[in-house]
Image (cartoon, rainbow, N blue to C red):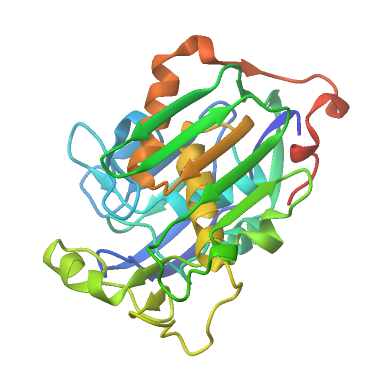
Amino acid sequence: MIFQRTIKAPINAIGVGLHSGCRVSLTLKPAKADQGISFIRTDLPNHPSVPCDPLLINDTRLSSTLVDENKVRVGTIEHLMSAFACFGIDNITVELSAQETPIMDGSSNSFLYLLEQAGIAEQSIKKRYIKIKQEIEVKDEAANKWVKFIPFEGYKVKIITDFGGHPVFKEEYSTFEADFSKHSYIDEISRARTFGFMYEVEYMRKNGLGLGGNLNNAIVLDEESVLNEGGLRFPDEMVRHKILDAIGDLYIMGHQFIGAFEGYRSGHAINNQLLRKLLANPDSWEYVTFDDPDDVPPSFHFIR
């Protein structure tokens, strides 16, 4: 892919916010080249627009939420952003009738369907990729977490999880690496759902979170097992979902990465800290464009 992308036609969906519990209408609309990704709150006076910007991710409690200088919120954007990353969408306007994107089935699969139905349109201006030139890392020693970017001629994401010996999280299902020159995001990542534990419910309710969650839009676990009637879509669905989340969190930069991302017990907060550190270290990365499609790394040759 050497040119920027948007969608061909507007498309709408209705759902519920995972954390707010509010009914929300989502409309995706084409945008001009170089406009980027923006969110419009149609339920607020004057329909304020919030740009997709890592420096506006100011709430990372169980999701990635944009909060601008006027306290306008656009919540839980990571699954939608992950779908945009899959199709390489550079320019799009997202209209929302509430403070949060709809959770749909807890994965990014429904958003991919909307994008497919709207159609993908190439634009006349070159796509800018972010190429990682130097390794850059963020560690949270207190929480025993780390994430990093590594130079790599393609795009791959590796996540290592650790859930303290829970029976569902077997050792062989604790790590997954997706090299997108070999793996299909659509087949292997997009259907992986968000998840949570029963013991977290009280905390979430006290903090106004998880109000729209149920067994139709999230994997729920008790101390021993998965409570969802259909079980898991993959034996390692949880670590695959962490990859889905990471891809969405990273795409808040608005560009696809040429590089590798690795994380141990990664989450929305530390993923955003990595983006902020990247922006603060301009020598560690550069924008690149391509004149010949054959020069684009294989990770980006196909819609995957």
- At x 51%, y 39%, the residue is 251
Q: In which quarter of the image is residue 217?
A: bottom left
In-front residue for pair 216/6: 216
* Residue reaching furthest to the left: 206
In-front residue for pair 96/246: 246
The x and y percentages for residue 114 are 59, 61
- Is 263 left, or right, of 259 in this rendering? left
The x and y percentages for residue 179 are 71, 45
- Is 282 left, or right, of 1 in this rendering? left
In-front residue for pair 265/248: 265
Q: In which quarter of the image is residue 55?
A: top left
Q: In this view, does 145 lie above or below 28?
A: above
Does the rendering let one see residue 23? Answer: yes
Q: Is residue 203 above or below residue 4?
A: below
Q: Is residue 103 above or below residue 249?
A: below
Does the rendering let one see residue 8? Answer: no
Q: Is residue 122 above or below residue 176?
A: above
- Is 77 left, or right, of 262 in this rendering? left
- At x 38%, y 77%, the residue is 220
The x and y percentages for residue 127 are 67, 26
Q: In which quarter of the image is residue 277?
A: top left
- At x 44%, y 82%, the residue is 226
Quadrant that contains the N terminus: top right
